[in-house]
Image: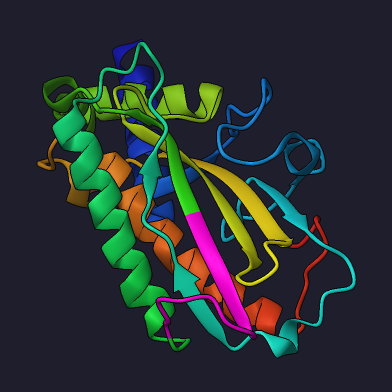
Amino acid sequence: MAAIGSAILALILTVVGLTGCGKTQKATPNAASGCAMLEPNICDNLVAVVGERTAGLRYVAPGIDWSAYTKVLISPVVFYASENSRISAEDQQTLTNYLYQELVKSVGAKFPLVETPEEGVMRLQVGITDIQGATPVLRTVSMLVPQARALATLNRMATGSYPFVGSAEAEARLEDAVSGKVLAAAVDRRIGGGSASTIAQWSMGDAQNALDKWADLIADRLVALQQGKIPAPSER
């Protein structure tokens, strides 16, 4: 029995080593009860999207001449904390400031950024709606000790998530900066991906990795939309 157990452990660790693990992974958003920032008519029309490099839920307004939009105005990021949120006001401010700066960096590398509404400008608004911190010590043990790593991998196979990881959820709204018409919207949730490079990170590290991912994805999606590349919901 011991030999069989050792063989199973070796197989699991080999699979982990071959497939690799990202810093963050896509998860199902918790927006079933409604959106925090998006209007009900937009929230109700969000469509689930398949693929790691897409938001979990998305809305794109029909009949938009995306080529007419050449600049972006980025609003300050807001944290929509629930009454039972365990995230301190200081961490909320740190994370919202961090995401705003990352958006400025990523989007600004692809579009001219402006500070006032004008024709041809898309206004981007992002709200962080949920943050769950990781459990640092237990998370480290589950990733560093081989036997614990194997159990953590089994947990991911069964539930889709590694144990003790953190998570973050956010909503994004893109509108015509002059008229306020909603052009597109999205809701996404990401959790810690189990990468060995995140072993020693702080409790908000998984959330921060999600923010990094969102900044890159949003910038890439804006480029795709502006070029008229509107993927089908089943796009991978």
* Residue 227 seen in the current view: no
Using residue 192 as the reference point, say whether residue 62 is left or right of it: right
Q: Is residue 62 above or below residue 83?
A: below
Name which residue lies at 32% across and 60% down: 100
State the colouring used for the structure image: rainbow
Q: Quadrant of residue 86?
A: top left
**What x and y, as percent, mark residue 90?**
14, 34
Q: Main secondary structure of the magenta part?
A: loop
Q: Quadrant of residue 43?
A: top right
Nearer to me, 38 or 57:
38
* Residue 196 seen in the current view: yes
Name which residue lies at 38% across and 85% down: 109
Q: Is residue 175 above or below residue 211?
A: below
Q: Which residues are magenta?
A: 113-125
Name which residue lies at 44% across and 53% down: 19
Using residue 217 as the reference point, say whether residue 195 is left or right of it: left
Examine the structure image and report whether residue 221 is included in the region drawn in magenta.
no
Q: Is residue 46 above or below residue 121?
A: above
Q: Is residue 152 above or below residue 208?
A: above
Nearer to me, 212 or 196:
212
Residue lying at the far right of the rendered structure: 63
